[in-house]
Every structure is written in C-alpha cells, then in structure tokens.
Image (cartoon, rainbow, N blue to C red):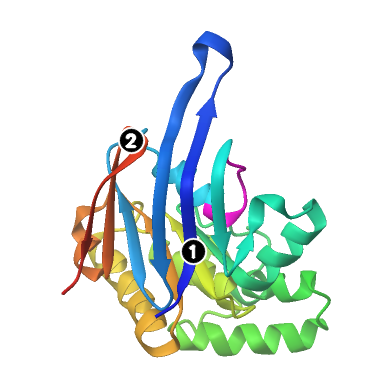
Amino acid sequence: MANIVSCRGLKKYFGLGDQRTPALRGIDLDIQEAKLTMFVGPSGCGKTTLISIIAGTMTPDEGTCKVLGKEISQLKSNELTEFRSKFIGFVFQAYNLFPTLTAVQNAALPLIVQGWERNSAYKEAAQLLDRVGLGSRLDHFPAQLSGGQQQRVAIARSLIHNPSLIVCDEPTSALDHESGNTVMTLFRELTDELGKTLIIVTHDSRILHFSDVTVSLNDGDIESISKLS
C-alpha cells in the first residue's frame, strides 16, 4: 500500500537565539493511504506541529514532508492553497461553523469557494449531510444543533470536495462519550468504505481503539509506533 505522507528529518523550532526551542527533533514517518492514524502524547510534545506541517499550514525549518508525492513546503502560496483545497480536508476541535449559516450552507462552503453554483453546491452538501445522519437538520443553524451534530456538519464540510487526506485536531475532546463514538464510527467508515486517509491528533484515550496506527510522540520525537495487527 502506498504512502500518502512521507516525512524525513523533520525539524521545527520556535523562538530565536538562546530562546529557540525545538518542537520537532528530526521526525521520520510514513503514513499509508486508507488508514486511520492517531498522534498521541502529552501537551507540547509536537503533535499539533507535526500535523500542521503535514497539512501545509506550517513550514518546517529542516527536513522534508511529502504529501501525495508533493514536497508541500516548496509550493508557492497559490499552489499550496489550490493543493489543500483539492486534496486535504480539515476537522477542528471547535467546529468552526459560521453561526449565521445553516448546516447545508456551512457544509457547501468549500464548493462555493471553488466556484460551484450555489444550488448545485447545496444539493451536494445535502446528500453528504444525509449520509452522516443529518438529513433532517439541513436548515438548522449551529446553535440549534448539539455538539455531536455540529461536528458531523464539520466532517461533511471536510469531505465535500472529496479530499484524499483528512486531518483532525482533537475532534472528540469537546464531545460526550456517545457523541464521540458516533463521530469515530463515521471516521472508521470513511477509511474502511471510502478509502480515505485520516490523521487525528488526540488526548482522548476513549477513542484509541478506532485507530489502525498510533504514533506516540514525546518531547518533539517519535517514542513508538503501534499498528493494529
């Protein structure tokens, strides 16, 4: 199975001069396509930095990070924006939904940004929201939805442009156990049935059993990699 992400000698520092602190200390990591990979470890261990570099929202100071064969740190700003809009989906802890837009309008946003006609984008979003169990909530605003329902709108938004890679930053930490399990079951279906590659940063030990690969980080380096047999 091909690697969708390949990192070599990845280093990142924060601060300047004597105050410069290493966030990543030379990461070597391959992530296979159609797998659900979790990054775990204590706060400040480098999880978010690593996923940010993979997602193209942060640039490494040393080393390489190839995503779908592209060295993304070498892409120009407009090339990187186009690459992310085509191939990467994002799911955040805080949902990041627009409060004045309905569920279907929020989910359709990436297509509208790409220039889709609104009614066509809304139709596509409605079909996807129905798939994640929100077909009866299309016209509801975020404030009218539970936390788990808002997260499923955010997941639909991340999938609407059919990305190859989905990166998730603490997607269940604000959810109760039942809602978290619902979201993670959906993620597993995306991997098992649609062949999507997911990378999830998490502190939530309740969801670790959903992963194919668990990467434990500590102090900016990989401590261990465990794979589901």
* Residue at the disc numbered 1: 5
What amino acid type is highlighted by mark number 1? Val
Membership of 57 in magenta stretch: yes
- Give the quadrant of the C terminus: bottom left
What amino acid type is highlighted by mark number 2? Ser
Q: Depth check: 70 or 121 in front?
A: 70
- Name the residue located 38 percent from the left edge and 74 percent from the top edge: 187
Residue 201 is left or right of residue 112, and the answer is left
* Residue at the disc numbered 2: 43
Membership of 174 in magenta stretch: no
Q: The magenta stretch spans which residues?
A: 54-60
Q: Determine if residue 170 is in view.
A: no
Upstream in sequence: badge 2 or badge 1: 1
Q: Residue furthest top?
A: 18
Q: Which secondary structure is most common in the magenta stretch? A: loop
Q: Position of residue 6 (x, y in %)?
A: 48, 60
Q: Which mark is residue 35?
A: none
Disc 2 element: loop
Q: How far, Cα to Cα, is label 2 from label 1? A: 23 Å
- Name the residue located 40 percent from the left edge and 65 percent from the top edge: 31
Q: Position of residue 65 (x, y in %)?
A: 55, 54
Tell me if residue 106 comes above or below residue 6 in the rendering: below
Tell me if residue 167 comes above or below residue 2 in the rendering: above
CB atoms of marks 2 and 1 within 8 Å: no
- Name the residue located 72 percent from the left edge and 58 percent from the top edge: 80
Residue 199 is left or right of residue 113, and the answer is left
Q: Residues within 10 Å of mark 1 (few under 14, many from 20)?
A: many
